[in-house]
Structures are given as C-alpha cells and as structure tokens.
Image: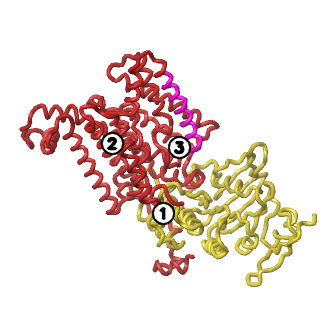
C-alpha cells in the first residue's frame, strides 16, 4: 500500500519518511500562546477565515436589523448612528435623531439583542460540547435534564411566589432548579465512578421525565387558571424581560464557558474518537467527561434561567457548523457561537414582529424555522449531515 | 535525537472481572525492536491483556512496565506518548476528516493551548504519505473502506511517536492482500510491536516470538517453531493439525485437519 503509493505522491522515500516519524521535536518553543493563535494555527486556511468573516458580518447585520424593527420602525442609518454615537461619543456622530429613538434602541432593543446573542451563542457551544461528551449528534442542551429542572424551579415560584429576591426571582429559582438537577443527574450517571455516554443520556432523559411530570402536576393542581398559559409561555422561551441589569451574568457565563471549552478543544476532539481510543491517546476520559458535563450543564442552567427553554438552536447549529468548517472543536466552537447568536437574534426578531403588538415565544420560532431548515439540509446532503456510514 | 524502540514487561499481571480471571498471572518480557504475536482462541484474554497496557483495564494485581516505568503510576498522557494503540474503536458519529483523525495522535504531546508546530505538521504529512493516505486526507473518515480506516488508525498511532505499538487484531476485516501489507509494514517499522492475531500462519511469518494465551493463562511462549506444535494446537485450539514449512520463508505453516479433535 505504501511504497508504490508513497513514491507516486511524495518525492521522499519510505526510509526518509520513517526517519521523520522517529524525529524528536525541536526544542519546545514558547509553550503558551493565546487562544487566537491556537485557532489560527488549526484553522489557518483562507476558507475558514472567510467563513468566520461572513459569520461576523451576518451577526452584525442581524443585530442591526434587531435594533431597527419593532413596534416603532427606526431607519437603519439612524440605528447605526445611535450605535456609533454610543461607542464613540458626540465627537464622531452628531445626535440628530429624536430622543425617543435613542431610548428605544439603547434601553429596550439593544439589551434584548445582546441577550439573544449571548443565549444563542451559549446554546450553540453547549450543544456542540454535549454532543461530544455523549458522543451522539442527536443530543442537545435539553438532553441532560437541566432545562426541565430549571422549568420546575420557575414553576414553583410562579405558583407559590416565595423567595422574595426582587425582579430576578424567577431567574434565580430557575437556575436553582437547574443546579439541583445537575447534581442529581451527575449522581445518577456516575454510579460506580463511571459516566458512560449512554448512562448520561439515560439519566438525563429519566430526570427530564420526572421533572416534567412534576411541573405538570404543579400546574394542574393550581387554583390559578392563568398559571398554565404563563408556564407554557415561559417554557417556550423569550427575551421579553431583557434589560441591561440582566446582561452581566449570561455574559460572564458565556465568556467562562467558551473560554474553557476552547482551552480544552483538543481534548473535546479526542472524545469523538471513542472512549477507549481517547484513553489510548492520552485523555483521562472519566474525569474530563465529568468536568465538561458540569460546565455544559451549568451554562445550560444559566441560559434557561435568563431566557426559558429555547429548543433547536443547540441541536442544529453544531450540525450546520461542522458541515461548514469541520468537526475540529478548535475551529467549530468559535463558529457555532457566532452562528447561534445570529440565528437567535433573528428568531427573536421574528417572534416580536410577526404578530405585533403581541409576541410569540421565541422557542416556537426557532423550532418552526429551524426544523424545516434542518430537514431541508438533511435531504439536500444526506452524506454531509449525520449521514453515511 | 530520534525516538528509539521501547520495552514491555508484564510481571504477574492478573485481571479479575466478576470473580473470573480474564488474565491470570501473566508474565512476559518483550525487548527493544521485537515484533511479538499474542495468539489464543476466542475469549482467551488477548484483548483484556492488551487493555492493561494502554490503560483501559487496571490489573487487579501485578505490574505493567513500559520502558521500565510502571504504566499505571504514570499520567495517561505519558502512556500515550510511549504506547501507540490501534483499536477497533471507529469515530463514525461526526464528520471528522482523515487528517483530523490522524492529527489526534499528537494530542498527548501538546500542552493546553499549544498550537500545532511545524514538527507536528511534518509528522502528520509523513504518516499520511507512509500509509498512502495523502490523497484521502480531506475525505470523511466514515466514508473510508475497512482497509483505509485501519491505515488511518495506524497513522494516528504513528504520529504519537510511540516506542511501543499495541495492535488488537489489526488484520480483522482485511483481505489477504491488505493483511500482508499491514504486517509487512509493521515489520518494516523497526519498532517494538505487540499484536493480538488470529491467523496463526501470518503470525508465524511475521513475528519474532509468539505468546499463547488460554483461558487467561500464558501457556506457551517462544519462536513460532517451538510454540506451534500439534500438541499445543490440540490442547489450546482443540484442532488436529499437521505442521509444514512455508516453501519460501521456511517458517512453520499450520495445516488443520478436517476431522474433529480425537481427544
């Protein structure tokens, strides 16, 4: 197989190639470089740079659209000017617009767009990471049971209304629900010190079922007839509560979560090789899977706490991104964050304009838009997406 | 400086699972540059034994010494830098390219965040070329044929720059042409190789020494001539066989009898 083929394609002889393979590395250079250098080195192809550039462009475009449209239409150039003024001050752009426009853009729409971007990016990166830790591309952030736990936490507060934590009571109780579920799933899945992908999925599914039943029970036995629709609305997700005060928490969560995932990107790649191979390639699979599970689950919990359960983003964005830039996490994670953010801003824009002045839960839009798009992709290229064996 | 072949010493390795000894007090010593075959019937414990070397199954008792160091007292990365394993584990769920799969072999040599260097790249290119995978490097791994996959997994083990290669039935699912190619290639590597093999004649043709496992115990060890005897084949494999010589290489050739074993 080798000698003749090698001679055709490579000027070097079999012996010379073997010598290369036996060569020790030259003295280790500067060991630690930035994440950016790592990403550049792994994805240094012009194709990848172009894809990322296009995705950044898409994100900016969708974000500006998100500032323009709503109950009051604000012209694109005004939205951009307000944005530029906000960033660079009066020196660069003279404020010549109506003050109410600025209030709408800066106080109402921008936090909403930023929150949607943060949530979308978080869903994308957690979805991708979870698919790797359970080695199943049909998994998504919802599969670990954390979303169901967060929903139960939120519903408890909606019905009994205790805690008294001010405006963020709902968010905090949802996060606590998710956190408790995290520990429960971890405990169940880690029986005997091992956390296999199958056991993790089964633990998550079982926990989801129990918590969903619990949520339904709380809703159905409530004397408040409005509770059911409020719960349904919250469960399907939305950014109606967005305000600047809320932003720092999901921002910090995304920064930490994505940062750790990028640092661990090489190891996430090894998980895709199968557990035995990953060990043989030098990864402590059990410890790594457990720590990445905690990270992904915590990020999911925060995401659900601030925006409810938004389906489909964490499931389909990783597929589209792998299709575009490949499965190497060093390249795919930044891309899935960008694409998840754009998609979610767009979905939110649709959710709040399509039946204005009423709002749809954004989860309905992500599923209604994302589902058919995903089916189209599946049918268009059966080999590329989750396809041929 | 170049990577030198390593050594492997198993000292009284026992592996119990559910009260049953999968590996029972096995002691063997493999020196630098040797190519040895691990043979034995189905369920004899070949895979279980190999798993104690690349750190899947921790021995219940006994030690595994790789280059004189206790493999189970070293970090996982250390073992991956010293032992390259070719397993039947196929990454088929995700659209990894052949190059992605082979590049995984460098992981244990890298610190967190350390980018790929020109050395890593040179190793990747050399391994792909050696195994004739250069034209396939951008193909999705899961679209490869069985032989191509096996070569890709071997290339991945080679870029690990191991001093010891461990192969678990590497010729499984390969036709005779690809079986010979693979074993000839392993022979030419001049590194230390331990391979679990099913085909006794191929094992005799290519291995310096054979180790025979039966129900977890090491029942014979030595050159193919001394190990592959009618008695051993009858006791271990429950077959009647005549031993001949390969006309070209002079190595032993097992000719099984059609008849069932007499005892």
* Residue indicated by mark 1: B140
The mark lying in front, picked from 3 and 2, is 2
For mark 3, give the secondary structure.
helix
Disc 1 to disc 3: CB gap under 8 Å: no
Q: Give the chain letter at badge 1.
A: B
Quarter-of-image position of residue B204: bottom right
Q: Position of residue B70 (x, y in %)?
A: 65, 51
Tint applied to chain B in the drawing: yellow
Quarter-of-image position of residue B160: bottom right
Q: Is residue B74 above or below residue A25?
A: above
* Residue indicated by mark 3: A289
Q: Give the chain letter at badge 2.
A: A
Q: Is residue A40 above or below residue A125?
A: below
Viewer-side residue, A78 vs A222: A222
Task: State the extent of the magenta-drawn residues as a range.
Answer: A197-217
Q: Residue at x 36, y 51 (%)?
A: A335
């Amino acid at each position: 197989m080798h000698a003749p083929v090698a001679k055709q394609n490579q000027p070097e002889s079999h012996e010379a190639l073997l010598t290369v393979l036996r060569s020790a590395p030259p003295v280790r250079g500067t060991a630690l470089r930035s994440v950016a250098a790592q990403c550049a080195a792994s994805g240094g192809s012009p194709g990848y740079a172009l894809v990322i550039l296009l995705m950044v462009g898409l994100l900016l475009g969708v974000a500006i659209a998100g500032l323009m449209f709503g109950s009051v239409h604000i012209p694109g150039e005004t939205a951009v000017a307000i944005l530029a003024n906000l960033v660079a001050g009066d020196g660069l752009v003279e404020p010549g617009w109506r003050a109410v426009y600025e209030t709408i853009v800066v106080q109402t729409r921008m936090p909403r767009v930023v929150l949607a971007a943060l949530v979308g990016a978080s869903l994308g990166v957690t979805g991708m990471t979870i698919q790797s830790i359970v080695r199943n591309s049909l998994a998504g952030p919802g599969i670990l049971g954390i979303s169901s736990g967060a929903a139960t936490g939120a519903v408890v507060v909606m019905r009994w209304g205790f805690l008294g934590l001010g405006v963020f009571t709902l968010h905090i109780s949802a996060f606590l629900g998710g956190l408790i579920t995290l520990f429960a799933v971890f405990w169940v899945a880690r029986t005997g010190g091992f956390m296999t992908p199958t056991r993790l999925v089964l633990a998550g599914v079982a926990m989801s079922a129990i918590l969903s039943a619990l949520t339904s029970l709380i809703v159905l036995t409530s004397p408040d007839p409005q509770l059911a629709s409020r719960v349904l609305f919250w469960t399907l997700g939305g950014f109606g509560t967005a305000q600047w005060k809320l932003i720092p928490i999901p921002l910090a969560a995304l920064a930490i979560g994505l940062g750790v995932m990028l640092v661990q990107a090489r190891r996430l790649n090894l998980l895709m090789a199968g557990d035995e191979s990953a060990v043989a390639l030098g990864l402590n699979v059990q410890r790594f899977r457990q720590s990445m599970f905690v990270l992904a689950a915590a990020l999911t919990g925060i995401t659900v706490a601030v925006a409810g359960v938004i389906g489909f983003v964490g499931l389909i964005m990783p597929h589209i991104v792998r299709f575009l830039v490949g499965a190497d996490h060093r390249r795919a994670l930044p891309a899935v964050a960008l694409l998840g953010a754009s998609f979610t801003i767009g979905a939110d824009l649709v959710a709040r304009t399509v039946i204005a002045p009423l709002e749809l839960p954004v989860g309905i839009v992500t599923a209604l838009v994302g589902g058919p798009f995903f089916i189209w992709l599946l049918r268009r290229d059966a080999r590329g997406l989750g396809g041929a064996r | 400086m170049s990577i030198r072949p390593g050594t492997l010493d198993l000292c009284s390795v026992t592996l119990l699972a559910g009260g049953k000894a999968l590996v029972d007090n096995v002691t063997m010593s493999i020196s630098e540059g040797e190519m040895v075959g691990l043979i034995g019937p189905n369920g004899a414990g070949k895979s279980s034994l190999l798993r104690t070397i690349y750190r899947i199954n921790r021995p219940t008792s006994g030690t595994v010494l790789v280059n004189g160091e206790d493999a189970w007292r070293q970090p996982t990365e250390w073992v991956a830098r010293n032992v390259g394993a070719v397993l039947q584990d196929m990454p088929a769920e995700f659209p990894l390219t052949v190059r992605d799969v082979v590049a995984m072999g460098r992981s244990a040599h890298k610190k967190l965040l350390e980018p790929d260097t020109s050395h890593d790249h040179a190793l990747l290119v050399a391994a792909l070329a050696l195994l004739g995978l250069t034209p396939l490097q951008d193909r999705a791994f899961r679209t490869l044929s069985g032989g191509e996959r096996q070569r890709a997994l071997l290339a991945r083990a080679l870029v690990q720059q191991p001093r010891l290669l461990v192969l678990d039935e590497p010729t499984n699912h390969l036709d005779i042409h690809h079986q010979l190619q693979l074993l000839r290639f392993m022979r030419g590597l001049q590194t230390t190789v331990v391979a679990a093999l099913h085909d006794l004649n191929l094992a005799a043709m290519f291995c310096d020494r054979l180790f025979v496992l039966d129900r977890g115990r090491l029942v014979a060890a030595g050159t193919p001539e001394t190990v592959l005897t009618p008695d051993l084949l009858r006791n271990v494999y429950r077959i009647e066989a005549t031993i001949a010589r390969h006309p070209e290489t002079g190595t032993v050739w097992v000719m099984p009898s059609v008849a069932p074993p007499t005892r």
